[in-house]
Image: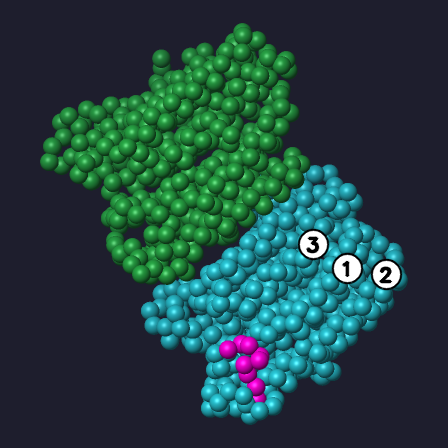
Amino acid sequence: MSLGTFLIMRHELLLIAAALIVLIAEIFWNPDKKSSISLFSIILFGVITIIGFLPSPAGPLFGGMYVSSGTRLLMKNILNIGALIVFIQSVTWLKKEENSEKISEYFLLLISTLVGMNFMISAGHFLIFYIGIELAIIPIAALAAYDRYKNKSAEAGIKLILTSALSSGVMLYGLSMIYGTTGTMYFSEVASLFGNTSLQILGFIFFFAGMAFKISIVPFHLWTADVYEGSPVNITSYLSVISKGAAIFILMIILFKVFPIIMGTWQKTIFVTSVLTMTIGNLFAIRQQNLKRFLAFSSISQAGYILLGLIGGNQLGMASVMYYILVYIFSNLGAFGVVTAISNATGKENIDDYNGLYQTNPKLSLIMTLALFSLAGIPPVAGFFGKFFLFTAAAQQGFYLLVLIAVLNTIVSLFYYLLVVKAMFISKNENPIGSFRSDFSARFAFGICVAGIVVTGFASVIFEAIKNLSFGV
Amino acid sequence: MDILSLFVVIPVLTITAILLLKDTRQVRLVSAFGMGLQLLMAAVLVYLYLSARHAGNIDEMLFVKDYLWFKSLNIHYAVGVDGISVAMISLTSLVVFAGIFASWEVEILKKEFFISLILLATGVFGFFISIDLFTMFLFYELAVIPMYLLIGIWGSGPKEYSAMKLTLMLMGGSALLLVGLLGIYFNSSPDKNQLTFNILEISKVVIPLPAQRMFFPLTFMGFGVLGALFPFHTWSPDGHASAPTAVSMLHAGVLMKLGGYGAFRVAIFLMPEAAHELSWIFIILTSISVIYGAFGAIAQKDLKYINAYSSVSHCGLVLFAVLMMNQTAMTGAIIQMISHGLMTALFFGLIGMIYGRTHTRMISEMGGLMKVIPFLSVCYVIAGLASLGLPGLSGFVAEMTIFVGAFQHPELFYRIVTIIVVSSIVITAVYILRVIAILLLGPTTNEHFEHLPDAKWFEKISVITLIGSVAAIGLAPFWLSTMIGTSMHPIIERILALNPF
């Protein structure tokens, strides 16, 4: 093990170190100032995020079980940015009386999920991939049940752990078939030995179904709304953005690198699941009253759009997926940030409660509008560019029908996003949510999100940088 | 900074300035100043354009500026104008200017109102100066979305329903359009090497016919939704009726023209073969728009609904003329866009002013307004006469050119349809004269109406600006049709070269 080896695994090692430091620091922390642990953890994590952007060597480790490359580093960095915003957004919530005893656990668990995601993204072998994916999901189940005195939160935890165990089982079954027919678990070897037999296709389908659970692609989405509603808002936003993003990244890498031979098969699979995901996610979102459930279904439909970037198996597709996830991080976390702020201040989470919000809290309403417009893909905010590139990527491979279905779906999604805008700007309310001022951390997170939503689109350098690091089948 | 980009920069600066203001009186002054500057810029642009043409510049587009934006997809921020876009820009700046004065006395959320209104205008200006399909599409959507808030917050009647319907239908149109544009983009280069969104470059290649057959209908319908193409026109009556005055003016006056302009500049110019082949379908649909819109207007009782249906009819005529694909008819289509833009803005402005006084828009509840508010009434008559195509006003020039051009089409089917469509003139006369008779003439039916104040100074500015322009086009149409005609020439040449019919 030379220094270079450590540098290649920089992301994972630093995160593990951070998790341990936070855990140990809590023991020695002044019990009266427990809440300042969050500040300490955030600064620590912020430093790691910045270090992540420094240039680093790339290459395989452990005989190819672990692979690092520019693309994968970029994916990790995107996730780090998102996680950082979630951390900053959760400060207010962690300050609450009932949470003060378990602040360091919060950071420890979230950072360890991030370690899992990073290993997953860097996997060159299905075993590492599997370990990563389990590490990425199990601590989240604990966090979903963070408000353990609430029935719904406990329910969310147990639902998440059960469905994820089931999906892992399904996926392992598929992997066992792949192993049985190829005799190896290394990505590169599976890719070269993979044929087109029905058993292998079946193995792939099981694998895809397992991944579909994690990304909550229809018809494997049923756990999503309940878990999102029951979990604390910050965990929900983490699940809907970071977990989903990581799972999509690794699915993309595996599809492109391991299964290029059966591209026709996975294109059909993605076509069907993408149409179902967009349509059903959108139709269910229309009927939601609770904003967390609303955003849950909206995030399901967003996953459907993201699949459009995967379907072509082209370089532009990979670039647009990474770009869209980045945009989606800013937009969705912006929306969740508003929900968090209002939920922390008043405990209200229904769309009706937002009636007349613009009268009392104009800035929050504007941020929410901006975030929702970005999710809907309205120019000039970043979501428009993100969606445009996703659609372009699919159109490049001739999937015009799919693009048409997707753009028509964005109209449906615009309808329910506008319902929220309507509530805030147009609907009258006898006693709207009172005027309040968020604390510094929340405003700082809003600043990052708004800057991201506005700048990511116009600044073409970001897209070009991502494009340069992408590859096709 | 080139002169064209200023048309986007000035509104953005105006919005920024409004954001920084606290006092509502200043808000409208700043808006008026910003849009007045914009009007001045439009005049300067017309002057520069004409003198450049006079000096012998025969480029297809003038003042072209091109900045590379997204390198890997070859997306540019590219601007440029020809006579047609210059005319549309002038129209827009006139209507926006008039719209600011027509909404001088907005009651709630003044600041937000002017910001949304100018944001909408930014989108429209950006659309007309773009020659890159990506930026064009971006500005197009930018122009649509503020409508939701403008109608939803400041509208009247079933405003939430109308706002939602309008936004969703227009965005639905842009959804079709997006697929069409992507189709054009991926066929914009024969060897697939250097794909481009630039209209001028795409016009140099021939998009394969199977692709044209697929993407022409999508593109044309996408723009057609905004141009009130039957059966996608249903957003228009509800939307216009619920919108506040300035928004109706801007929307019917300018935003609907985006549809006609886009159908012409993108759908037909870039895909003439498919346009020629499939035009009969859309000719039938637009004819239905024209006739049905006119009959619809007769049946309405609400002033705004009457005018909204009349807009469907008139904008249908624009698309109808564009599809005839010859020089005269297409020139007529552009003049009709400008004429209708001014005239309908005038109408909606006047309706808003009358409504502000009588608090009703039902024609049956009003009568004899000519005696009470003579200035507004006379203006209303002028607008009406322009709408029914009285010689000396802009409507006559436009419709005459369109019908003459349409009848030049060599095929029998098109000529018969033209004859049917001409009948809309008569129907238009019916609903216009009927409204004038009931609304303005006769005895004053309601005693509350006997002491209504006539137009205030800001209303007069708004109305006179528009009437002046309508009359100017009617009396001296030649400079406008020359300006359009020169630019129309290369487009027609391309169409004719590809379709010797």
Q: Which residues are magenta?
A: B360-368
Give the labeled residue for mark 1. Answer: B283
Q: Are marks 1 and 2 in contact (CB under 8 Å)?
A: yes
Amino acid carrying label 2: it is Phe
Subunit of mark 3?
A: B
Which residue lies at the image location 54% right of the left edge and 81% below the top edge?
Answer: B365
Q: Quadrant of residue A144?
A: top left
For the colour cyan, the matching chain is B
Distance from disc 1 to disc 2, alpha carbons, whole Å, reads 10 Å
Disc 1 sits on a residue from what chain? B
Q: Is the magenta region chiefly helix, strand or loop?
A: loop
> In the rendered view, does B89 fall on the left or right side of B401?
left
Depth check: give the residue in front, B494 or A87: A87
Residue at mark 3 to residue at mark 1: CA–CA distance:
12 Å
Residue B413 is labelled as 2
Question: What residue is rendered at 42% in x and 12% in y?
Answer: A62
